[in-house]
Image (spheres, rainbow, N blue to C red):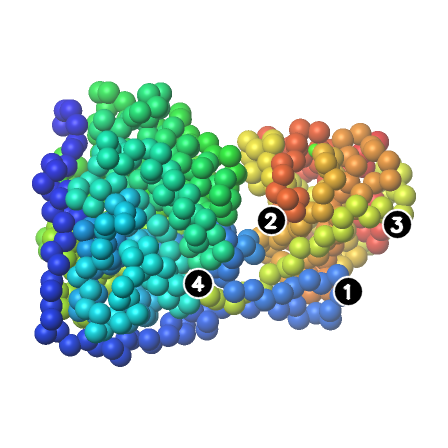
Amino acid sequence: MSGITKQPLSVLLQRRLVLLIAGVGITILIMSIVLAIALANNAASTRTASNKPSHSTNAKTVVTGQGSWHTDGSQILDANNQPVRITGINWSGFETSTYSPHGLSSRNYKAMLDQIKSLGYNTLRLPYSNQLFNPGSIPNGIDFSINPDLQGLTGLQIMDKIIGYASQIGLHVILDQHRPSASAQSALWYTAAYPESRWISDWQMLANRYKNNPMVIGADLHNEPNTPACWGCGNPKLDWRLAAERAGNAILAVNPNWLIFVEGVNCYQPGTPCYWWGGNLQGVARYPVQLNVAHRLVYSVHDYTPDVQDQPWFHASNYPDNLPVLWDSYWGYIYKQGIAPVLVGEFGTTLQTNKDKQWLASLVNYLGTGAGGINWTYWGWSPDSVDTGGILNSDWTTVNQARQASLTPIMFPLGVKVSVVEPTTTGNKPTPTSPSAKTPTPLSHGHGALQVYYKVGNPGAVSANQVMPQLELFNTGSASINLSDVTIRYWYTLDRQQAESYWCDYAVVGCNNITSKFVSLPAQRAQANAYLEISFLNGAGILGPGNNTGQMQIRFNKNDWSNFNQADDYSYDGSLTTFAPKTKVTVYYKGILVWGSEPA
Ligand code: CA
């Protein structure tokens, strides 16, 4: 197709112009389906150290999803660095002239939120308009006899109530500036009536208002930017990437813990095909969004079926097999290359035609299962979105089972208990011994021989706020050894003294069988003034001849998350992206150097 893929305004209006069903006669099912997702708790993989407790064992049990979230490559992590995944739903209404979520003329808001939770969603994406915060914007479309505690409240106060109860029951919240004015979408993030300064000040107000509630995880800066918005063109009035940096940094200045969700545009460069509004992130490869706080950026797109707009790719001879390649090219590459996490912030369909069904099945498959999958929030909850419908049927109570069943396999439960190794922080304590540079001593006969293989866990990040050595220990000798007799040292220059934290993300021998300590050297050596010493507990067992431990994915950070310069780190090698023997990572058997060379 030539030119621009552009949804006609009428379509867009339709999609968001929701018909308020003033359903008076509908009896509310107050009995919300609070069938607890107990399987979440049952599925918890609690790895408890089975060996006798060592003085340095720091296993603790945490609940996934807790605290503020941050990013690491294409993964979102919680405050305990546990992988989390947004699998949520949009609840529209605040962005419209009802100035409140839709359905409250039929249902109690807590019953609705309980139902969302019970269906397995873990996050709510809440669209709003800037007009919501005007004094003249009076919430309406609410039956106060069934929502008595919302009576007399402003839109913002109703938002407090929705967020408050969602937080209480374990639903996280993403706020979405859906449009400046309640009456229509806007291609740009501002209009004459709602200038950029208002867009930013409203965001800062919200970031400040909810900064003490970690269940509110972030800001979707503007919904579906499109032509004349551009990406990378450099015009501050039109370059959405630059605007996203301005707003994102303004938000992070108020609340550095929020995730910043940046949608795409529709058209990237002249002459190249355009895509859904907000769905084209091809510009990220050359013009990435750069925020002042690291590990806060999440890219976001929207993707739909012909329910919203027919598109050329729905007519490809190889449909639906053409879809994954299409998604890769417009946004999936960001996830696949580990550039940043991606949120498919809106997708939805009436699921009426075969094309719809093939599309949804393909997308669900593409999003993947488990913690490592792509984040998503389905559009939407309400049945009054005329182009897509919702998870709720038009009675605002029963569930569209076909749509719900399609999403169930890719839900990700939060609130699961997991066992993790607690960080070992030793500050700047001097090492008890005063090691001098040694050369390896061959293991005495019968003890086998040890080698360590290394690769870098965050290639390309010479300056990084985490050091991520990935290690494998090989026994190339002829006898078995007890791993508890082995220690490994990773040597580096701590550029600025700071307490540090250690994490084990994954280990074949079990993270609960690995422990570590930070040791500062009494005197600077070549490319090292510290090392991380990794040791094994009895539960790690025996390493037989010819065997190896498998991967140990280790990382550590300064507690203020300031960067390490890894260029001067003795053990670091940013070019080693596959495992290779590494003599600058040293190995000790019963305290004796048996592999590698210590720094001079
Ligand atoms: Ca360094």
Q: Quadrant of residue 370?
A: bottom left
Which x, y percent locates residue 168? 42, 67
Report crowding for label 4: few under 14, some 14 to 19, many 20 or more residues within 10 A (C-alpha): many
Residue 306, x across and y down, in percent: 13, 44
Q: Earlier in the sequence, mark 1 or mark 2?
A: 1
Q: Position of residue 258 (x, y in %)?
A: 46, 47
Secondary structure of the residue carrying numbered label 1 = loop
Is there CB contact under 8 Å for labels 2 and 4?
Answer: no
Q: CA distance from mark 1 to mark 2?
A: 22 Å
Of discs 2 and 4, which sits in the foreground?
4
User: Which mark identifies residue 414?
Assistant: 4
Three-letter code for the amino acid on which mark 1 is drawn: His
Whereabouts is ligand 1, in terms of quadrant?
A: top right
Left or right of 333 in this view: 324: left
| Foreground pick, 315 / 67 | 67
Provide the residue designation for mark 2.
553
Instruction: Kindly identify the amino acid type of the residue bearing the numbered disc 4.
Output: Leu
Circle nearer the N terminus (2, 4):
4
Location of residue 463 by image quarter: top right
Which kind of residue does numbered mark 3 sit on?
A: Pro
Question: 308 or 220: which is nearer to us?
Answer: 220
Q: CA distance from mark 3 to mark 1?
A: 17 Å
Between 281 and 31, the one lying in front of the other is 31
Compared to 377, does 455 lie above or below?
above
